[in-house]
Amino acid sequence: MTLWGGRFSGKLEENAWNLNTSLPVDKRMAIQDVDGSLAWAAALVQSGILTGEEYEQICNGLTVIKQEFSEQNFLFMDGDEDIHSAVERRLTELVGDAARKLHTGRSRNDQVSTDFRLWMMAARPRLISQIKLVQLSLLEKAENAGETYMPGYTHLQRAQPVLLAHWWMSHFWPLARDVERLDSLEKRISILPLGCGALAGTSLDVDREALAEKLGFEKAAPNSMDSVSDRDFAAEFLFCASMIGIHLSKLAEQMVLFNSSEFGFFELSDEYSTGSSLMPQKKNPDTFELTRGKSGVLIGLLTGLLTTLKGLPSTYDKDLQEDKAPVFAAYDTLMLLLPVLAGGIRTVSAKTKRMEGAVDSFMMATDLADYLVDRGIPFRETHSIVGKAVRMAIELGSGLDGLTLDQYKSIHPAFEPDLYQALNPLESIRKRKALGGTAPEAVQYQIQQARSSLKGE
Ligand code: ARG
């Protein structure tokens, strides 16, 4: 039996039913649906619709249903159109007539969005915890990296040397922003639609602010027409998920690249890599490749929902039923991905000799220019002087450290024997000690800040 059968004499065609039903997706909000109904029943007592006795019957029935869901022995029936109708049907079986009063003044339009928001209010902290585990693996890697250095790249060209710890931390902060973004989303999830009815509000005398408080919402939605159609929170959640995906994908891409024989900066652990069915020598970074791949899927989910929302006529439209599947899929994807990535990072080993060996003396060209700046020559001039030294070294097939003092002096008289110190990678790194730089003390400070940010300070 549907909730709307009275007006109809015929039955919904089978395929049309399958299209219409949302139970396979929204049964996931069963507990939230029961909680919402418990709160609504209390409001119905206050507005004189339910007697104390009926209220008690409803509460008992809903408690049984909640238990059935928790124990996974709730029996769905063929006619259950969505989670809301399934709960109401079961409640009627359990408590009879009182259950038939529960939907007074309420619509599935305000109910579904309430359930969805409640679901997200519970899911959001779980997602944040998983992000923090990845952050923690990155942080621990940074803490254990000592003064190992590696090439830093721009345009994927060797640019300047950086500490490996600094590189690890460069993947920590994007995730910190993701956590912040998810935190600030809470206040837009936490707006209660219940009591908005189908679109125009409820005719019952309900204290919606009290209802909001009871259900753990910050406030009640101020406009019923807006509220039954507002899915900003779902779109924003998907944006957050996409952004997390993008951050993880960038990290994963670097892992794949640095794990290749060409770079050879990292060796993935056996626990997080796979082999080839054909080539016995292969050790593939599948977990990182899949991280990169899934981020595309996440962006697709966001794009899908945004496209669904665009241009909908005002208030509730059935298109909105398509809001939950992408959110659940994004959540599930991240909850699968994040722990794997945390483990992949924790167990990867850095091949430090290879990393440090990839830092060539040309990467200290900027430091050499700074060396001349220290001797009073304007930076624009030093840039071109060092450019000449680079050209000479390339022509001679040497590095910047292969040119003799005489050769340097032939380019500019300001060069002295101490110029070679400027070509030392650790010297270059130690000089960058301003906040946010790669110098060991700046990285230490950064790590402290990261520790506090993980603790939520
Ligand atoms: N299953 C529906 C959804 O997820 C519930 C709301 C149905 N409202 C309606 N007017 N048919 O959106």
Image (cartoon, rainbow, N blue to C red):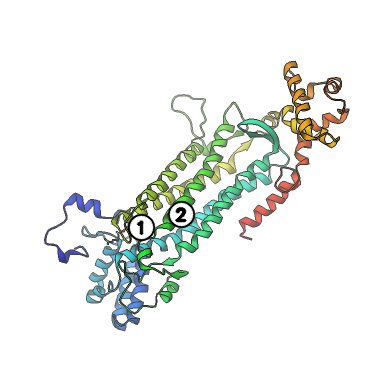
Quarter containing ligand 1? bottom left
Query: Which residue is the site of mark 1?
Result: 28
Towards the viewer: 269 or 202: 202
Is label 1 in a helix, a strand or a loop? helix
- Is ligand 1 within 8 Å of the beta carbon of the residue shown at mark 2? no
Q: Earlier in the sequence, mark 1 or mark 2?
A: 1
Q: Is residue 31 visible?
A: no
Is label 2 in a helix, a strand or a loop? helix
Towards the viewer: 329 or 210: 210
Numbered badge on residue 236 = 2
Q: Position of residue 380 (x, y in %)?
A: 76, 33
- Quadrant occupied by the C terminus: bottom right
Q: Amino acid at mark 2?
A: Glu
324 versus 384 height, above or below = below
Q: CA distance from mark 1 to mark 2?
A: 20 Å
Q: Is the residue under label 2 in contact with that under label 1 (CB below 8 Å)?
A: no
Q: Report which quarter residue 199 is drawn in.
A: bottom left
Q: Position of residue 82 (x, y in %)?
A: 28, 59
